[in-house]
Amino acid sequence: MTVTTAEKAADVQAATVELRSLHRRFGSTVALDGLDLAVRPGEFLALLGPSGCGKTTALRMLAGFEHPDSGEVLVDGRDVTAVPAHRRDAGMVFQSYSLFPHLDALDNVAFGLRMRRVRAAARRKRAAELLDLVGLSDRGDRFPHQLSGGQQQRVALARALALRPRVLLLDEPLSALDAQVRLTLREEIRRLQQELGITTLFVTHDQEEALSVADRVAVLRAGRLEQCAAPAELYGRPAGPFVAEFVGTMSRIPGRLDQDRVEVLGRRLPVDGPPPAARDVDVLVRPEALRVRADEDGTARVVATAFLGATVRITARLADGTEVKADLPASEAAGLGAGAPVDVSLPERPVLVAERTART
Amino acid sequence: MARLNVWRGAVLGLAALYFLVPLAASVVFTVDVPGRGVTFDAYRQIVSTDGFGSSLLLSLELAAATIALVLLLTVPAVVALRLGAPRLRAVVEVVCSLPLVVPPIAFVAGIATVLKWGPDHLSRTPLFQTFVAVQNPDFPVVLVLAYVVMALPFVYRALDAGLGAIDVRTLVEAARSCGAGWTQALLRAVLPNLRGALLNAAFLTLALVLGEFTVAQLLGFRPFAVWIVAVGGEQAQLSVAVSVLSLLVTWALLLALAGAGGRTRTASSRG
């Protein structure tokens, strides 16, 4: 499982990708509503968002399978919007198993080389190299139905890389796999991408997946870009309530805005970012930022606990009925069972606030 | 389990009786002539009768042409239907089933009427030569056209079932992202995975063309089925021998086709 020198040499200069105000509508549904996105050379960018946010449509436009109503797709600064899919120079791995059932693994990988009329000996050699790259050098003669799901996606990855594409496109490649396989394969995809230095776009609806492998994560909502940032920034400094709640777990605690401070849980805390116009607001809190400790006089009650290994996630109901989630080290949470009275507090740090939404 | 096997055996036995008894009786009737013992005279007579080879050859040519034309017509159509306009599937299915509803006798009456336009209205135009050409008794193109229409319901269904078993869209997109154009994607990625369906369609079309009598007879051509009826008309033993023979010929051809596609069929069934 080593990258050959030829492999590296081919990717000396990784491609830049730019999407400019892409619009696309399917009948009455708007898939893309002016999407702008720039991908840096050699970057691993995850497109993250709820289903129907347009992330797959954006990827398919880059692959040439969809065409924008307006807007441009640029690769290396060149407008490729009108270039048909088979001349795009983009390798793609699909969500469903997409290997050609009538070809064995080696011929699947060599398919693109056959289309390019590479000689049989040369293409078999290259395909064998690529199978080696994804750790399946001993499975070249297997047909897709003889391979497990994870192996099939590895072969698909090798096939996508066979033509040394400028851009690698991954359309939820892990979503059909078991949890265990998903974990190892995503790490392997990441390792391969870093070794090859190929510009990669990765569509997923799984935020953990996006945060753990990508250099930057682009959060999409209703066909627009909400925020594109490195995982740590996305988690720690979300651009708005949508990103804050979509990425990671967030609890909403009602508070009252008073100039640039917010009154919440008996404290007056500074507001992070521009405060909203309304006075009744929700304070957005990550589970690890919330402090919960056992207190006989506490007004909050533990509703449920979930053991997560190193931490225990506690769901507590505040006096006003709001439910919040907090992560505690397992040692501290030992005595806290359902119904236990607790005290919930926030540290003296700026907090993110959002306009209060109607609770159901 | 044992009871299930007994039932299976019983059902299989009954079905076998239903098919084999009449067949065996026919064979016995043709070879066991009263007073002369076992003789294959009836069969010898058929094979030596004038026109056996030529009519069989004509039928085979017609079948080959029909299979080629109907597949060329329907395969791109059903693939395009799957990719581009899945909602039109119901419409196309109904249209393709129409030949089942229209009796061949009505169909051939319509064809005959159209063919009469040649001498009636078009005798002074160059189109007249076309009308003559399609009715060439050595290779009646008009029969191929008629058989294509009659084979549509079977071919469409076979192909539709085959396409239903594979994810055409993903296969095409995967091929295209590997640098294959539309034609290449169809030929290299979709068709190989449709081999079973294509073979089924060819099977059904072959059986249809070999056994078709009404249209060919009424239009005045002499493929195998028409010839067989003409030969066996007078003598009881001969007519039965002829049907047994035609059954055997059809079987042999179907087996040959299965043999030709056998390798590929196992390949596709594994997927």
Image: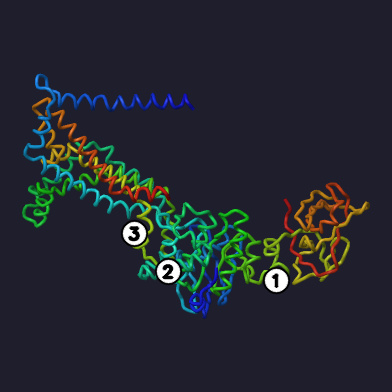
Other residues around mark 2 within 10 Å, as few (<14) / some (14–19) / many (≥20):
few
B158 shown above or below A284: above
- Residue pointed to by mark 2: A125
Q: Is residue B164 left or right of residue B239?
A: right
- Residue pointed to by mark 1: A233
User: Label 2 is placed on what type of residue?
Assistant: Lys
Judging from the image, mark 1 belongs to the subunit labelled A
**Same chain for marks 1 and 2?**
yes
* Whether residue B230 can be seen here: no
Q: Nearer the viewer, residue A287 or A129?
A: A129
Q: Of callouts 1 and 2, which one flags the residue occurring earlier in the amino acid sequence?
A: 2
Query: Could you say which quadrant of the image residue A1 lies in?
Result: bottom right
State the image coordinates of residue B132 (x, y, percent, origin top left). 9, 51
Q: Nearer the viewer, residue A287 or B260?
A: B260
User: Label 1 is placed on what type of residue?
Assistant: Glu
Q: What's the CA distance linking mark 3 and mark 1?
A: 48 Å
- Which label lies toward us, 3 or 2? 2
